[in-house]
Amino acid sequence: MEQFKTYALMTGLTLLFIWFGNMIAGEMGMVMAFLAAAGMNFYAYYYSDKQVLKHYNAIAVTSKDAKGLYDIVFRLTKEADLPMPALYIIPDAQPNAFATGRNYEHAAVAVTEGLLNLLNENEIEAVIAHELSHIKRYDMLIGTVAATIAGAIATLANMAMFTGGLSSRDEGKGVNPILMMVIMFVMPMAATLIQMTISRNREFIADEGSAKMTKHPEWLQSALLKLENYAINGTIMPQANEETAHMFIINPFAGKIFPFKQLFKTHPSTEERIEKLEVLKSISHNV
């Protein structure tokens, strides 16, 4: 069911992109958008995980290299009924983690050295369980595709702005300035908001998955507080970019101030996440 939902959402985002291409340049724009979307989805499906791991200089580790971490991941995969994912450590001081990959058999979990240094074993287990919950629901794939399509729509809007946009469709009639404004500004914003909403909702679900997997919601609560405090007061990860920020358990840009920060944030607030985990903790104690 989760795989079906993921592919359905991917299809919906692709159709949105194709419709946008049609609005910009008619049938030719629609065909070009379809070909571009097919190419982007193919690349995102097969190669996005390798690209993001390379971008963050992630180093593959085995049980010989990081036995304690490996044992935690191995134990949790058994609990979640998942194959053992590839395990990576990112040589960066900012404590953070993410999951990537296209399916259960081609999944990877990456944690930073900073996370291993900051958190205790229980908190690390809770973070790993959170990332495995993303893998269980195919979140890493849909997040990548959503970011790719949102970026493509923004690029298409910029191209249309510089090339006259709707001129080929409205030959002899002139371009409707209101429609042009909607297409050039509202569509990219809508695509970005869809991407952010997907990311925020799935963080809540992965938090719940972590709590159920470890049976200790308080472990993730403690981990999130430590990660958030460091992200706000510490240094920003040098390689971090907006395209991949939604993948991390804590936004690597949490310490930066952006205009309309609440509207375009990739993660729910840590306070909201801890409150929801508190409800789960109360339920588990009453069972």
Image (spheres, rainbow, N blue to C red):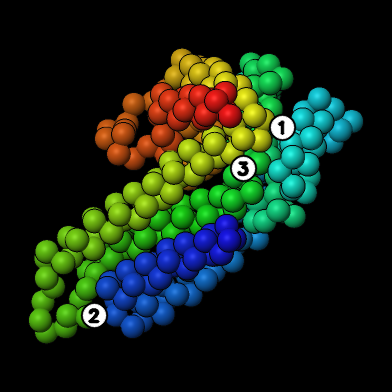
Q: Which residue is mark 1?
A: 89
Dot 3 or dot 2, earlier in sequence = 3
Front in this rendered view, residue 34 or 165 = 34
Residue at screen point 24% across, 69% down: 165
Q: How many marks?
A: 3
- The label shown at residue 133 is 3
Give the Cα distance between marks 3 and 2: 47 Å
Which amino acid lies under the numbered mark 3 shown in the image of this protein? Ser
Residue 105 picture quarter: bottom right
Label whose residue precedes the other's in the sequence (2 or 1):
1
Q: Comparing marks 2 and 1, which lies closer to the viewer? A: 1
Q: From the top left corner, tell me how far across and down residue 139 is, in percent.
A: 56, 50
Q: Residue 168, which numbered label?
A: 2
Which residue is pictured at 37% across the width and 52% down the height?
A: 194
Q: Is residue 37 left or right of residue 85?
A: left
Query: Dividing the picture into quarters, in which one does residue 163 lie?
Result: bottom left
Within 10 Å of disc 1 (Cα), the crowding (few <14, some 14-19, many 20+) is many
Q: Are marks 3 and 1 in contact (CB under 8 Å)?
A: no
**Is 160 above or below relative to 104?**
below
Q: Residue drawn 74% across and 40% down?
A: 79
The nearer-to-camera label among 3 and 1 is 3
Distance between the alpha carbons at the discs numbered 2 and 1? 51 Å
Q: Position of residue 43 (x, y in %)?
A: 59, 62
Q: Is residue 223 left or right of residue 86?
A: left
